[in-house]
Image (cartoon, rainbow, N blue to C red):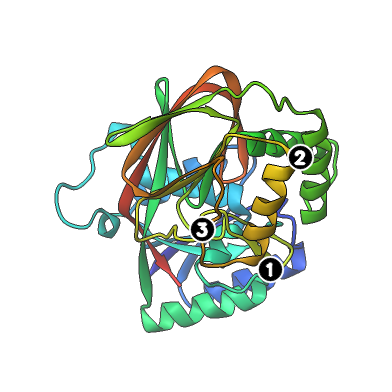
Amino acid sequence: MRAMLLVNPKATTTNARTRDVLIRALGAAVELSVEETAYRGHAATLAATARAKGFDVVAVLGGDGTINETVNGLLNPVNGGQEHPGGDPSRHRPALVVIPGGSANVFARSLGLPNNPVEATGAVLEALREGRRRTVGLGQALWEDESRYFTFCAGLGFDAEVVRAVEGLRGTGRKATPRRYVHTALSHYVATDKRHPALTLTGPGIPEVRGLFMAIVSNTSPWTYVGGRPVTPTPWAGFETGLDLLGLRRMGVFTLLPVIRHILTERDALPSGRHLTQLHDEAEFTLTASRPVAFQLDGDYLGEREAVTFRSTPNALQVLV
């Protein structure tokens, strides 16, 4: 079995010694090529190359951002190539192996992998020996003349603004820890506009909803983690269903506090409240904005947008897990 391992040397929770141990362990199980990512978007290019060269597996040692790039490289044909027609599209792509190396590792943990990279490697090696695979669906976001797949979440509005602020802090050398996200969210909430919502939700068979301050789009649950605690605004979301959404039409304290308490403590029940908008297992919907608003995919800030369409992509990838 030929495998390419993509290593993010700047991954938050690994060091050179750990990476060497993991590489040796994987190299003993498969015919392994190792590539380090050197710049933003590099993992997508490397994954697309691995697919074009017929690799059986693409493994990733990194955080959710590196995994997102890899997934997009695997799903987008190289040089305008075409997908194989018919059947299960995931079978015509290299299988994905995920070894968590970031701060949150939401996708890896949603797959049931340990959050520790060494323990996760042990689980992956077991899956390799047993040929154990899981087929997962993805989300796809489309705007203007661009599109991008996501593994676990997307967002427009307040949550994306928090991601943008944390990325700015990371640019100054600070780590993106759960505590930093919480602190940034609290400080950003004080300054955010709580009077003029910008977002409108539309979609096939979906009643129009105006006046949303923020919208969380989920491909699975949890949406994220605060340390070891899962955060579940869309608890029914899953890799085998369509997309889910939670939208907020109010940003006041008395609206937010019950929602925050619920999504931090309840695993299976939907949040409730007359100022919430919820969707479950949808194939497609669109969010438009009256002004440019912040946009994020899998925790990666992608600028400001005025319209984004979200689609579910079933049977997108096979994951060794």
The residues tagged by marks 3 and 1 sit, at their Cα atoms, a distance apart of 43 Å
Which label number is shown at residue 166?
Answer: 2
Q: Quadrant of the N terminus?
A: bottom left
The residues tagged by marks 2 and 1 sit, at their Cα atoms, a distance apart of 30 Å
Which label number is shown at residue 270?
Answer: 3
Q: Position of residue 180 (x, y in %)?
A: 82, 48
Which residue lies under the disc numbered 1? Answer: 20
Reply above or below: 186 against 4.
above
Point out the frontmost of discs 2 and 3: 3
Closer to us: 7 or 216: 216
Count neighbours of disc 1 (C-alpha within 10 A) and say few if under 14, some if 14 to 19, many if 20 or more. Answer: few
Q: Position of residue 77 (x, y in %)?
A: 32, 40
Which label number is shown at residue 231?
Answer: none
Closer to us: 141 or 289: 289
Instruction: Judge from the rendering whether residue 127 lies leftward or rightward of residue 15; answer left or right.
Output: left
Point out the frontmost of discs 2 and 1: 2
Quadrant of residue 186 in the image? top right
> Does the rendering let one see residue 113?
yes
Count neighbours of disc 2 (C-alpha within 10 A) and say few if under 14, some if 14 to 19, many if 20 or more. Answer: many
